[in-house]
Amino acid sequence: MNRSAPRLLLTGAPGCGKTTVLRRTVELLLAVPSPGSTAAGQLQTSTEPLLASKVAAAAGIVGFYTQEIREHGRRLGFDAVGLRGSRAVMAHIGFRGQAQVGRYGVDLAAFDSLLRAELTAGDGEIQLAVIDEIGKMECFSSLFVEFVDRLLESPAALLATVAAKGGGLIAAVKLRPDVELTTVTTTNRDRLPQQLAENLRTYLAQRAGR
């Protein structure tokens, strides 16, 4: 069996669950059970992040997801959390500068540092890249745009969330003929992780057997 790498993009309105679907898909692929849990596939991200990062590295899975920073129920910004263990405050209401999305300022230096740590790899080392998300904040970084362009031309599979609206890279990736764009809704979001994981697992097994 020889087919091109899956390019799986998740889109939808803010709050629809894109990041949750992406994270659960990665959890199923890594299958690192949490202590006291009988359910395989529950990613260990808090108590033993090094375990999860080692498994991800061994599987050739790289990338990052975003996580809200909240205080007293109020959203203050966003962390970028790398699968290799890096973490950076990517955006915050307290940041000021030219890179601004609504009330959030973007720390491009911190974000670029995380990108270098999480997405830099030798030829053929990346089996799957996980990106959350291709959005306005991230696209302020020319390094991010460069990494995404490079990944799309590589043999690596891609699992990414992408903003529902936006021009530039946001619009361009959706128009590529080699991507599969899925809109996340309340109807499909519970079953999507298993479907996506099965799709990616088949491709990763194929590459491993070459």
Image: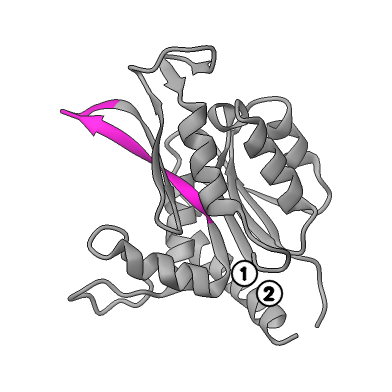
Q: Is residue 150 above or below residue 99?
A: below
Q: Residue at x 55, y 65 (%)?
A: 61
How far apart are labels 2 and 1 at the CA level? 5 Å
Q: Which numbered marker is on residue 200? A: 1
Give yes or no for residue 153 being in the magenta stretch. no
Give 191 or 174, whichever is nearer the viewer.
Answer: 174
**How is the rendered protein coloured?**
one colour
Instruction: Name the residue type under label 1.
Output: Leu
Decide: marks 2, 1 in contact (CB < 8 A)? yes
Q: Which residue does the numbered mark 2 point to in the structure image?
A: 203
Say which amino acid is labelled 2.
Answer: Tyr
Nearest the viewer among 7 and 84 is: 84
Q: Which residues are magenta?
A: 63-75
Direction from residue 164 to residue 18 in the image, left or right: left
What residue sits 81% from the left and 45% below the top?
Answer: 176
Front-lying residue, 167 or 52: 52
What number is the disc on residue 108?
none
Q: Looking at the picture, how far across and down is residue 167, in whole percent?
A: 71, 25
Magenta-drawn stretch, dominant element (helix, strand or loop): strand
Residue 56 % position (x, y): 48, 68
Residue 186 visible in the picture = no
Residue 200, horizontal then vertical, whole percent: 62, 69
For image coordinates 27% across by 65% down, the residue present is 48
Task: Describe the element under mark 2 as helix, strand or loop.
Answer: helix
Q: Residues within 10 Å of mark 2 (few under 14, many from 20)?
A: many
Q: Residue furthest bottom?
A: 209
